[in-house]
Amino acid sequence: MKKLGLVGGTGPTSTLLYYKGITSIVHKKMGRLPNINIESLSAFDILDFSNEVNHNHLAEYLLSSFKILKAAGCEIGALTGLTPHIVLSKIRELSPVKIVSIIDTTMDYVDKIKVQKVGLIGTIPTMRGKFFREAFEEHGIQVITPENDDMYTIETIIEKELGNGIINEKSQKELLKIVEKMQDKHQIDSLVLGSTELPLLFKKTHPELTVIDAMQIHANVLAEMIMS
């Protein structure tokens, strides 16, 4: 099997979910456990760098991690957070390890299903940024994001609760109300969980809404690449 390097800690909870998910898939199919190295960073630093106008600090921070993973013998690399993908093009050019992007794996999945208008929820840099939106629009899919106040609500839930492994029923209800508002106002036909912590909270929605769990899709692809 190939050795996988994960840049984690962005946040810690999603890193654990990646590790558990990938090892479970590989063990189920091969009866063995994969060789995985994790370079854990600070989620707080990632968010601070992501909110800067100039993202050079973020790119340097992530690139140093991929160099460490390469030195550890990793053949495949991935980020366990979606927000850091805001500098994906910069770090891909210089990374010594092949980076498998959650954006690419999500779009490969979307190509296989019929969606036309997606709702995107995640951190504020993800919802307001162009890096994820443009990928969908290039596939002819319209992207709808929440209203400003709702964006800050989602950001707070991710940063203060989900990033620390806290599952709050009240927050779950708030999130579902935001999604229902997007359905009623914009008639979205699908919802992208654009933060790797959101699957912890988002357990249900209206049956007619297709939920796209970007993290699970990404983990599945990484597991398959390890075994290939």
Image (spheres, rainbow, N blue to C red):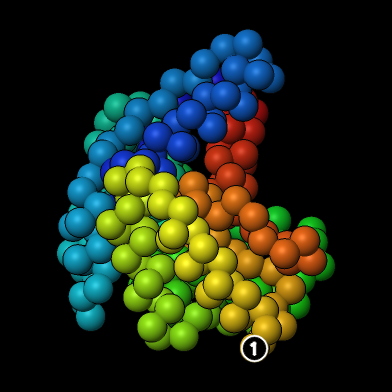
Relative image position of residue 206 (x, y in whole percent): 72, 64
* Residue 170 appears in the picture as rendered: yes
Q: Along the line of sight, which residue is nearer the eye, 56 or 126?
A: 126
Relative image position of residue 141 (x, y in whole percent): 69, 78
Q: Residue at x 58, y 32 (%)?
A: 223
Number of marks present in the image shown? 1
Residue for badge 1: 185
Quadrant of the frame with the C terminus? top right
Quadrant of the frame with the N terminus? top right
Q: Residue at x 36, y 61 (%)?
A: 157
From the viewer's perspective, tell me whether residue 76 is left or right of residue 7. right
Q: Along the line of sight, which residue is nearer the eye, 128 or 60?
A: 128
* Amino acid tagged 1: Lys
* Residue 198 appears in the picture as rendered: no
Q: Along the line of sight, which residue is nearer the eye, 96 or 117?
A: 117
From the viewer's perspective, tell me whether residue 58 is left or right of residue 38. left
Quarter assignment of residue 90: bottom left
